[in-house]
């Protein structure tokens, strides 16, 4: 979510999760995940994925974040989602978010993954890597992370590269340095179709 275009980052992350978990990803899970991420993206501070479980389960925390959403004139639909969600009983909320929470926990309970991707602003400036001739090496060991987590991480990294690449389209072609992306075992990171 730490991208200049947070809405596009949300769309990419929802797409990645829905493709990795396609067998158990339904419309309600998609709706809750998207609304939660858009709510985090509407905050003035840099949003992090680790905030999402708290947003969905902690009423006081949610009220503070949804308050920011309600300030935006163009956020009426998102605010309406939270009105629907708040009208649910606590057990109904828990039931609604359970399919998403089991996927998030499987991802966020791993300390390495949490630190690398979901804990705060990125320390890697992908725009600088592409524009200044840098090199970024990322090792995503499926044997250490598991199939789904490796697919998620790989797809998130590819998404970050893709977003930086599309931002380069604004640069005149003559001033845009060539850049390449090399993926070993790319089929494992196919959750993002670019």
Image (tube, grey):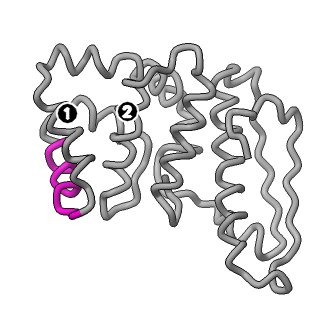
Q: Position of residue 132 (x, y in %)?
A: 79, 76
**Residue at the spot 25% in from the left edge and 47% down from the top edge:** 77
Q: Is residue 97 left or right of residue 7?
A: left
The magenta segment is: 62-73
Return the disc, 1 or 2, that comes first in the chain's sequence. 2
Q: Is residue 112 above or below residue 20?
A: below
Looking at the rendered image, the disc whose residue lies closer to the viewer, 1 or 2, is 2
Q: Is residue 175 left or right of residue 58?
A: right
Most prominent secondary structure in the magenta stretch? helix
| Frontmost residue, 41 versus 194 | 194
Q: Is residue 50 above or below residue 151?
A: below
Q: Secondary structure at mark 2?
A: helix
Q: Position of residue 191 (x, y in %)?
A: 68, 33
Q: Which residue is mark 1?
A: 58
Residue 63 in magenta stretch: yes
**Residue at the spot 23% in from the left edge and 38% down from the top edge:** 81
Q: Which residue is mark 2?
A: 31
């Amino acid at each position: 979510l730490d991208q200049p275009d947070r809405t596009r980052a949300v769309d990419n992350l929802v797409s990645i999760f829905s493709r990795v978990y396609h067998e158990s990803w339904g419309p309600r899970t998609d709706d809750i995940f998207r609304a939660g991420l858009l709510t985090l993206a509407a905050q003035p501070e840099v949003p992090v994925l680790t905030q999402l479980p708290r947003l969905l389960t902690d009423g006081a925390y949610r009220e503070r974040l949804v308050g920011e959403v309600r300030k935006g004139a163009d956020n009426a639909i998102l605010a309406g989602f939270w009105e629907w969600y708040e009208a649910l009983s606590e057990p109904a909320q828990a039931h609604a978010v359970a399919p998403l929470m089991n996927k998030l926990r499987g991802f966020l309970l791993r300390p390495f993954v949490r630190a690398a991707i979901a804990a705060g602003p990125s320390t890697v400036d992908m725009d600088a890597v592409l524009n200044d001739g840098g090199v970024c090496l990322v090792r995503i060991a499926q044997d250490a992370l598991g199939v789904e987590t490796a697919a998620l991480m790989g797809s998130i990294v590819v998404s970050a590269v893709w977003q930086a690449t599309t931002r380069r389209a604004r640069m005149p072609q003559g001033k845009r340095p060539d850049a390449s992306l090399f993926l070993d075992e790319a089929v494992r990171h196919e959750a993002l179709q670019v």
